[in-house]
Image (cartoon, grey):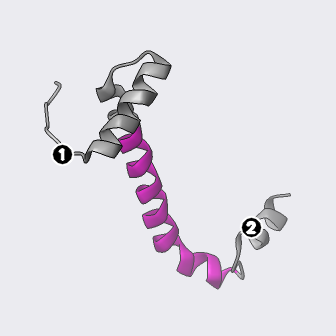
Amino acid sequence: MRNIISISLDEDLKKKVDKLAKSKNVKRSNIVKDALLKYLFIEEMKNSRKELRPYAEKAGMFSEEDIFELIS
């Protein structure tokens, strides 16, 4: 089921969204939905990373380079 929400944008942001929507030939709402989905994904990854960090450190992995070396 689709739900409708209203958001408030300043004029500059609205113009940027409209310009991108026009260049991609999509609706403004598609641009906003895609941006929101990407934001939520990034936040979920940050939360997962935060939750998993103690386990990684316990295993001796303190950086992304440590993990890369392990899987390479």
| Disc 2 target residue | 67
Where is residue 54, by image quadrant?
Answer: bottom right
| Disc 1 target residue | 8
Q: Is residue 60 above or below residue 22?
A: below
Q: Is residue 23 above or below residue 61?
A: above
Where is residue 19, by image quadrant?
Answer: top left
Query: What is the CA distance from the residue labelled 1 to the residue labelled 2?
Result: 41 Å
Q: Main secondary structure of the magenta part?
A: helix
Q: Magenta region: which residues?
A: 35-59
Q: Residue at x 48, y 20 (%)?
A: 24
Closer to the eye: label 1 or 2: 1
Disc on the earlier residue, 1 or 2: 1
- For the N terminus, the image quarter is top left
Q: Amino acid at mark 2?
A: Ile
Does residue 17 belong to the magenta stretch? no
Q: Amino acid at mark 1?
A: Ser
Does residue 58 belong to the magenta stretch? yes
Where is residue 36, by image quadrant?
Answer: top left
Label placed on residue 47: none
